[in-house]
Amino acid sequence: MLQSSLRSSSVVAQALGRRNASGIALKYSNALYSAAISKSPQVLSKVHTELSNISTQLKTTPELNTFVNNPTLSLNDRTKGIQVLLGKVEGSGAKKEPVSDVTKNLLSVLSENGRLGEVQSVIEGFNEQYAKYKGELTVVITSATPLARDVLSKLEATLKQSQAALQSKSLKVTNKVNPAVLGGFVVDFGDKTIDLSVSSTVNKLNGILQQSV
């Protein structure tokens, strides 16, 4: 199911290019979630755990991160690299746990379509859907530098009063750092975005100035 769903949109995805990477990743995330939940809640939970492990491996192992972000590798080299990554996810010894077919198929399809570089975005999209399934509201606050703990606490207290938070079982707030926002912050939750960044203000100002010239 996952392979057929992803391959059906691969031609469109490849034509869009890096500019629409987030939209492309969302297509994979949706197909991945559908494939996992169609198996069983247990498989869905297992896939979530595996993807979290993959994400951690990519963040902590420079060689693996370089591997998934190298578009020049041959299909054969990508296949070998995937096996190394899966081996780390499985573990070893008594703790060795075979990776689910759903997760294997995801990496295989991303590799075949030349989209391994999107894997972290795909995982993020999957995690959002998994959080909804668990009744959790995940809020990502992106700032140029890490926000102070007291600032995050105030923001969290405010967000808890939102309608979306009141309708959820729990609220999880994470702070993502992106120097491109320059200052201020961007809040993403559910399908909503509140852009209070300096970069957004600068872009709006530039637009006004260009229209005035």
Image (cartoon, rainbow, N blue to C red):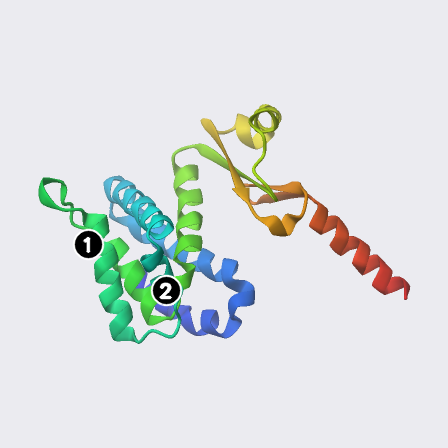
Q: Is mark 1 on a helix, strand or loop?
A: helix
Q: How many marks?
A: 2
Q: Which residue is drawn at 80% across and 59% down?
A: 207
Alpha-carbon span between mark 2 and mark 1: 24 Å
Q: Is mark 2 on a helix, strand or loop?
A: helix
Q: Residue at x 57, y 48 (%)?
A: 178
Q: Identify residue type, mark 2.
A: Leu
Q: Quadrant where the C terminus lies?
A: bottom right
Relative horizontal placement of residue 199, taking residue 139 as reference (left or right): right
Q: In which quarter of the image is residue 114?
A: bottom left
Within 10 angstroms of label 1, few (less than 14), some, or many (20 or more) residues? some
Residue 111 image offset from top left, x and y in percent: 32, 67
Relative horizontal placement of residue 154, taking residue 133 as reference (left or right): right
Q: Depth-wise, is mark 2 or mark 1 nearer the camera?
A: 1
> Which residue appears farthest toward the front when viewing the image?
62
Camera-side residue of 174 and 40 = 174
Q: Mark 1 points at which residue?
A: 87
Q: In which quarter of the image is residue 144?
A: top right
Q: Quadrant where the N terminus lies?
A: bottom left
Q: Which residue is drawn at 9% across and 44% down?
A: 93
Within 10 angstroms of label 2, few (less than 14), some, or many (20 or more) residues? many
Q: Of label 2 and label 1, which has the lower sequence position?
A: 2
> Which residue appears farthest toward the right when viewing the image?
213
Q: Identify residue type, mark 1.
A: Gly
Residue 180 image offset from top left, x and y in percent: 62, 52
Q: Are marks 2 and 1 in contact (CB under 8 Å)?
A: no
Q: Is residue 204 above or below residue 162?
A: below
Q: Which residue is drawn at 90% across and 62% down?
A: 212
Q: Mark 2 points at which residue?
A: 6
Q: Is residue 36 visible?
A: yes
